[in-house]
Amino acid sequence: MATALSSILPLTAHSSLCASTFNKPPSPLWLTTQFLRPFAPSLRTKSPFSPNSPPSSGNWPSAAAAVEGGQQSGDISMSIDVLKCFIDLNSGTWNGSLHQFDCNGNLLYKISTKLAASSYGENELMSLIQSLYIRQPPLSPEDEPEWFEYKIKETNMFTVDKYQQIGFFPKEKAFALRYQTAGMLETVLRKGVLGEDDIGEEFPRNLKLPSRRPSLVCENCLYSLEQDARVRAFHIMDPKGVLDMLLVFLEERGSGVIPHPSFDDSKDLDRITPHLGTWKGRSVTKRSGVYGATIAEADTVAILEMNENGQLVQDIRCTSDGSDVTTSVHWTGSISNNLVTFGGGFQFTLLPGSMYMGYPSDVAKSVQESKSFHLELCWLESPGKRQRLVRTYDVEGLAVSTTYYLETRQ
């Protein structure tokens, strides 16, 4: 077990955030200018995953797991353009809330948040700098709410390729990031003794803490098709490769508030019905990294329905462009409260707001059996249309590809 897990445990790293407090939220949310340090972009992208490796957890279609190695001569200029597009997409002031769920989809906490993002530098020296502000409940009715500020580690040519292993879809406005350490979340959500860390700074109150050393933290982000808003969802696995918790940020750029009242109701009994039916659409699969190129595009059909025995049945068919070959996957699972468990060890946690997050029940088992695995976010912003983002990992816990789906109900 220790050998299997050693490949997915995070590297030891210094905290990527520092915290400070305010009696009221700063207006505007100014960021402290950071010293510009030169760095060299990574000219190599590791591709340890082979298309001939065993199938991912749940036998995900092979197109989502295929990875091409190497770069072409124009990759440096291309990656700069991709990074600039990523920075532009994230820049601005984002208002919203952080929702914390357990693996059964129970809402544990909801906290108001603000995120301020801007950039500095040019070309290969461009960096995205972000500050996260979390509102703390007052200790007494007479007190004003406090806002904690956290400086998130910069995103630049080096970090997105080497550490965050970005999977980015500029046209679709979607991205996925992997954190080799818990990074921002480990710092923001971690309490020390009596609610203080080693240097005496307080951390947000009223949050369940993740495991001391999360082995895997993945962020999937989907942008609204109808407004300047987004969902950022985090899978947090514990050191044994089992899901510890799910985090969801609902954010809108500017001063507005996302109208999502159903997200406050953690006791709704029927979260599966919005996902049932036949969904047709398109998928795009890209290699991870700022140099990531499109690997495959496909027509997709996904059918999710209940059979006569009360089991949940899912059939997925993908037909890649330029090929007459169709890849099919058939899953049968059971539902217990808001947890769907499929044969083969893959699970969905059904969330409010017509979302679900998918993950393997045991990452360590996938590693031991030399299988790749994937993490998924699905969001139905409207009843007849949904977006999905699937992040595929190799047997060492490295993110090797990301697949974006846009589907409509038939």
Image (cartoon, rainbow, N blue to C red):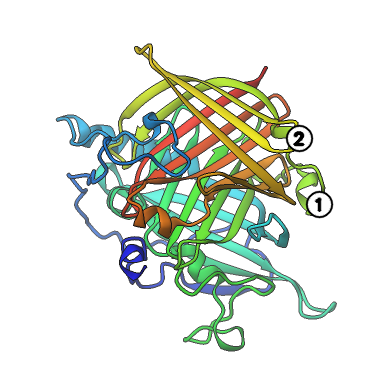
Residue marked by disc 2 = 273
Q: How far separated are the C-alphas under marks 1 and 2?
A: 16 Å
Q: Nearer the viewer, mark 1 or mark 2?
A: 2
Identified at 33% across, 47% down, the residue is 394
**Residue type marked 1:** Asp
Identified at 36% across, 33% down, the residue is 286
- Residue 111 vertical position relative to residue 379 in the rendered view, above or below: below
Within 10 angstroms of label 2, few (less than 14), some, or many (20 or more) residues?
Answer: few
Identified at 30% across, 31% down, the residue is 293
Residue marked by disc 1 = 265
Q: Residue furthest right?
A: 141
Q: For this view, does 264 lie left or right of residue 212?
A: right
Counting residues from the N terminus, which is met first, the one under dot 1 or under dot 2? 1
Residue 22 occupies which quadrant of the picture? bottom right
Q: For this view, does 20 lie left or right of residue 48?
A: right
Which sits in the foreground, 129 or 384? 384
Which sits in the foreground, 119 or 18? 18
Dot 1: element: loop
Expressed as whole percent of the image width and height from the top left, the position of residue 194 reads 61, 88
Dot 2: element: helix
- Residue 403 vertical position relative to residue 119 in the rendered view, above or below: above
Q: For this view, does 277 lie left or right of residue 6?
A: right
Within 10 angstroms of label 1, few (less than 14), some, or many (20 or more) residues?
Answer: few
Expressed as whole percent of the image width and height from the top left, the position of residue 223 reads 57, 36
Q: Is residue 28 visible in this depiction of the protein?
A: no
Expressed as whole percent of the image width and height from the top left, the position of residue 275 reads 69, 33
Q: Is residue 147 visible in this depiction of the protein?
A: yes
**Residue type marked 2:** Thr
